[in-house]
Image (tube, helix red, strand yellow):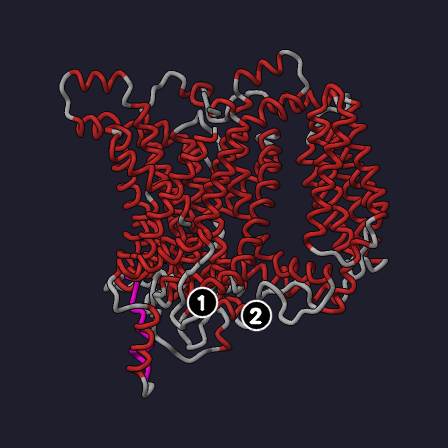
Amino acid sequence: MSEQNRDSAMQGSPEPLPHAGAEVDDPKFADKSYSQGQLVRRRFFRHKGALAGLGVLLFIAVLAFSSIGIGPIPGWWDKDFSTTGTVVNGGKPTMGWFHLGEHPFGQDTTGRDYFAMVMRGTQISLVIAFTVGIVSTMIGTLIGAIAGYFRGWAESLLMRVTDLFIIIPLLVFAAVLGRIAGDSGIFALGLVLAAVTWTGLARLVRGEVLSLREREFVSAAQAIGTGHWRIIMRHILPNTIGVIIVATTFAIASAILLETSLSYLGFGVQPPDISLGSLISDYQTAFTSRPWLFWFPGIFILAIALSVNFIGDGLRDAFDPRQGKDG
Amino acid sequence: MTRYILRRLAISFGVLFVGSFLMYILTINSGDPLEDLRQSTASNRDVLIQGRIDTMGLDLPWYERYWGWLTGVAGCFYGACDLGTDQSGTDVLSMLQQSASATLRLVTIATFAAIIIGIIVGILTAIRQYSGFDYVVTFLTFLFFSLPVFWAAVLLKEYGAIRFNDWIADPQISVLQAVIVGVLLGFILQGIMGGDMKRRLFTAGATAVFTIAALLYFTYVGWWRSPALGPVIVILVSAAFAVGLVALIAGLGKKRVLYSTLTTVGIGSILYFALQPLLAEPNWWLLLGLFVSAVVVGLVVGYFWGGYSRGQAMALSAVTATFMAGMTFVDHLVYAWAGFLELKPRPISTIGASTPNFQGDFWETTLDWGTQLILPSILLTLISVATYSRYTRSSMLETMNQDYVRTARSKGLSERTVITKHAFRNALIPITTIVALDFAALIGGAVITETVFGWKGMGAMFREGLTHVDPNPVMAFFLVTGTAAVIMNLVADLAYASLDPRIRR
């Protein structure tokens, strides 16, 4: 028993976190000073998971947008996601280790090229996820900053809306809004989803601002008569940029899951548009007969969400090495 | 404290009211409720449209419709509940009564399983920070965070249900499969237990050998189709649990606590035999009564053995009694498995909350419920486990770096006391909040799971209501989930107050 105790005591005792002080340890860099941005970049690129995530995400994005093109601009893939054709060889994927073949991801029951369909779905899901991430960050930062700086109505609004989301499941609220906005195109859907997902970030920013507004540099700015908005924009928000960027990343990851779930339920992206979620919804019964129709969209959702989550983890470690909560 | 709770309740119901208004307005404006009829080619189309306008009150302005719904709900407070009808005229209250129990059962089981597993995994990863085990769990939580539920559900249906059902028809485990499972388990366990190389090897080896032998033995005697635990295993496992619990929470040095839990196990073993005839065909009320009396027995035993550590003895004996009651329950369930397989040759179902027209005794019906429930609960649990274990880990790491933990260590307390008493209790405070906040998200997840598994639960009710722009089923769903969330928050507040004396007023 005693040995075990000592053992776990060693394990549990406070220990230096892996990134902290790493710059000083390296003699080559000991006498060189770095800007905040350089430090963050160096820490980020040392996080292998985040780097791999960044690579996978870039690869998927480039693949999705270059293969079938964006809007009127044609891509390098010659097939269209809506043209039906003859089903060759039961629609099986023709992809091998070193060649793509005619239909790398196979064909669906009406002979449409499944690679083109998955790429189209990936495009739409990525666009919505990034719209949600960026717009909800903007709303959340604005309301969080106002709530933290001015307190008053913005703060009570924020708290009451947060209370609301404790009672209404986010997915349910989003489903009702998605039902309204789904027909008006993917950007409308993205904006509507952003309208329900900003609360988490707003609370984070509020917390940061609450502690920053008591700091000396804010008092100094106030003493020389700087306006409130200038203080928020130039003095407070730049100090919360780390928190905001990290939260945005995680917001994008959860937005892609939210959108695909809604599309799966039928309240998100509406046909003729394709989302990765609606693809799974359409072909889930085909699992035994045509498993590839089910596998590919799911793997793409998983790969996107996982890589974005890893990037977020890397960014968190990079911006705040002391925290290291999830490293 | 009472004032605090009442204030919280008042706020919650205010928010519930605002939420209901918002949901109602959004739902009735989310589309065209007559869309399917407008496109129909039936000769009596206009009559049908007029009929639906009358049933749903579409000719009334929105505030009158909402007011009508609200007065119906207000009736619930004096026993005249009226949640309205759906678009085809079915009473929503009776729909709700059929569907609510299935969903709440699913969500409750998933919540409790996720809390228990999540907290244990979180603590283990915090204690073994930056070990191989920690990294594997970290990766898995990221994987579960990123997993699309509906996609994973279909995979689970294929591999957890269809393949399992094929296997249980003729359960065979080859030597190679047994070796793989054994080595894997041994590898995981040595990662958790830690220690030096020799100890790790011993842990892994012992686990692997034991698992392989057990798997092969079970297959040889046909245990998978006609399993049994029997009194010996129930009593031995319960006694081991009692000793382990005391060792973990109180320390084996506290003889009185140890004797108290062991006495509880002793009384439990006598009751195990005495209650056999009664448990042959019980009902839920009887089981509830027996469960409560088991807890009471534990408390009484703890009271008389306790001495100076009376409170601890009572608590641990009650937990032991609960565990033993659970083991006895499982024992009976396991015993009924063979008969259940005769009734239902493909046990794990992929569709529905219970098998239609299933006829069996109490234990077989319970098994039927369980086999319908297991896949959706695994799915819901996995995702919440990822959240909870993450929060427990970071919360534990934070408290372990606090000054009071260093003080506790430096005054020579054992590591067990430091972790369970000083670190863990304080780490629990943020976790309670997360669990309460997460409850609504879990119900939202249940909407997806119910769709995939074809349950006729509240999620399906919500989904159909929203598809048909039919507010009453949607609002009934909102009412139940909202009230459940309010209650969960209240429980969390109470737990919070008992954990953190600073907020007691």
Q: Residue furthest front?
A: B78
Q: Is residue B322 above or below residue B198?
A: below
In the picture of the structure, the residue carrying the numbered disc 1 is: B91
Query: Local crowd at mark 2 within 10 Å, few (<14), some, or many (≥20)?
Result: few
**Do marks 2 and 1 share a chain?**
no
In the picture of the structure, the residue carrying the numbered disc 2 is: A288
- Magenta residues, start to end: B29-41
Q: Amino acid at mark 2?
A: Thr
Q: Amino acid at mark 1?
A: Asp
Q: Residue furthest bottom?
A: B43
Q: Which mark is residue B153?
A: none
Q: State left or right for residue A223 relative to residue A188.
A: left
Q: Secondary structure at mark 1?
A: loop
Residue A64 seen by the camera = no
Residue drawn at the location 34% of the way across and 32% of the way down: A242
Looking at the image, which is closer to me, A216 or B308? B308
Number of disc labels? 2
Chain containing mark 1? B
Where is residue B7? Give x, y as percent: 40, 34
Q: Magenta span: helix, strand or loop, mainly? A: loop
Where is residue B394? Give x, y as percent: 51, 31
Where is residue B239? Give x, y as percent: 80, 37
Looking at the image, which is closer to me, B476 or B462? B476
Q: State left or right for residue A158 relative to residue B276.
A: left
Q: Residue furthest top?
A: B411
Q: Is residue B448 shown in magenta?
A: no
Q: Secondary structure at mark 2?
A: loop
Alpha carbons under labels 2 and 1: distance apart: 39 Å
Residue drawn at the location 37% of the way across and 16% of the way down: A31
